[in-house]
Amino acid sequence: GDSVTQTEGQVALSEEDFLTIHCNYSASGYPTLFWYVQYPGEGPQLLFRASRDKEKGSSRGFEATYDKGTTSFHLRKASVQESDSAVYYCALSHQGGSAKLIFGEGTKLTVSS
Amino acid sequence: EAAVTQSPRNKVAVTGGKVTLSCNQTNNHNNMYWYRQDTGHGLRLIHYSYGAGSTEKGDIPDGYKASRPSQENFSLILELATPSQTSVYFCASGDARGSYAEQFFGPGTRLTVL
């Protein structure tokens, strides 16, 4: 079945550091890929998505590019802030039907000032 | 105002007891979902629904039932709660008719089974 793998369980950075969180997926066809962010005490919320090969999604300075060749959708940000501290989830879904989301394990980002 | 709400926000139950978690959405979405969140596993799908009267098994349905009496409401039922069901549960709504299948999540229910 389909799956999503996030390599980093936890990432600790200082403000203005560069962030990369790796996401690789296994799925048939062309799933839609998502990054969700979850702040403490809240449910996950959509950061952005991409649905075609080479499409770049972006929001709030974060970005990721859909790469079907390497089955990846890595999250990057050039300069993190303390307010970016949260758990980040990579996910995939197929259009139509149940539109179920399949999540990676999540990456907890802690940014210190 | 929040579009997906959950109640209760916190629940302590005893082993063998019955637990019902409730979810309400005002998004008018057809699909609703129940996930549980555990460290190292991310979010895993328990049950989902295509609309009123429909329930479908997700990836980890054992020990759980679901009920969708209306478009707005979706409940998760633990008939005989066990300590292994201690977790944080999230409800979500979404509309598969859209192009991108985005889901909107509630704030979660923290369940502790003693």
Image (tube, rainbow, N blue to C red):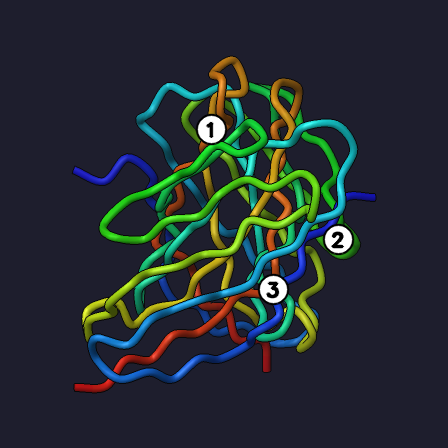
Quadrant for the N terminus of chain B, please.
top left
The residue where tag 1 is placed is B94
**In this rendering, position of residue A105 left or right of residue B97:** right
Q: Do labels 2 and 1 share a chain?
A: yes
Whole-percent x, y for residue B60 in the image: 75, 53
Q: How many labels does the image show?
A: 3
Whole-percent x, y for residue A95 in the image: 61, 22
Residue at image position (67%, 77%) is B83
Q: Nearer the viewer, residue A5 or B61?
A: A5
Q: Are marks 1 and 3 on the same chain?
A: no
User: Is B22 rendered above or below residue A17?
Assistant: above
Residue at image position (67%, 60%) is A5
Amino acid at pointer 2? Ile
Quadrant location of residue A46?
top left
- Please tell me whether mark 2 sits on a helix, a strand or a loop: loop
- Point out the frontmost of discs 1 and 3: 3
Q: Are marks 2 and 3 in contact (CB under 8 Å)?
A: no
The chain that hosts pointer 1 is: B
- Please tell me whether mark 1 sits on a helix, a strand or a loop: strand
Residue at image position (23%, 40%) is B2
- Point out the frontmost of discs 2 and 3: 3
**In this rendering, position of residue A99 left or right of residue B62:** left
The residue where tag 2 is placed is B60
Amino acid at pointer 3? Gln
- Please tell me whether mark 3 sits on a helix, a strand or a loop: strand
The residue where tag 3 is placed is A6
User: Is A60 rendered above or below residue A13?
Assistant: above
Q: Distance between the residues labelled 2 and 1?
A: 20 Å
The chain that hosts pointer 2 is: B
Residue at image position (61%, 64%) is A6
